[in-house]
Image (spheres, grey):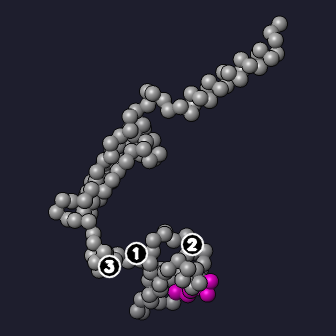
Amino acid sequence: MIDKSLLRELVKSVIAEEVAAIRKPSTNAAPPLSEERVTIASDADLVAFARRVLSLASDPAKAKEIAAGRYPFRLARPATQPAATPALQATAPVAQSHRIDSGVVTESSLNKLPRGLSRLVLGPGVTVTPLAKDRARSLGLTFERMKP
């Protein structure tokens, strides 16, 4: 018969080894990928990038790496175009807007909108609830009415 304390020690050591192996990065894991530089200066560049990601994602291993954030993409700045200066940034803001043609704008409908919007374009007859107005203010949204 095996001594219970000896059996307990053996189980502890096996568990400790397995936990250490799980925590330790695998030596046969793929080396970190060098980042892939992407230039997006036009709609055609954006379409080309989307196609590139789709082709990479057709390989299940690469799709897993992309989804986990281990396949880095970085924006490359064209050599002819320097980084934006504060003056350029101030003169070229891109306002993200969302159009609502009919119905009622409620607080919950505003919470479902994508982040990064700066204005809502409202059709004639669209009603905005008081809570929606408060929520829009806290989100930094402005309302703009379309002419009938």
Residue 51 percent location from the top left of the image: 31, 51
Q: Secondary structure at mark 2?
A: helix
Residue position for label 1: 96
Q: For the magenta stretch, what is the residue range? A: 126-131
Residue extending farthest to the bottom is 148
Name the one closer to the observer, 11 or 57: 11
Judge left or right: residue 106 versus residue 8: left
Residue position for label 3: 90
Residue extending farthest to the left is 80
Badge 3 local density, few (<14 within 10 Å), some, or many (20+)?
Answer: few
* Mark with earlier residue (2, 3): 3
Q: Name which residue lies at 40% across and 75% down.
A: 96
Badge 1 local density, few (<14 within 10 Å), some, or many (20+)?
Answer: few
- Specify the amino acid type for callout 1: Gln
Q: Quarter of the image holding residue 33? A: top left
The answer to whether residue 92 shows anywhere in this view is: no
Q: Is residue 128 magenta?
A: yes
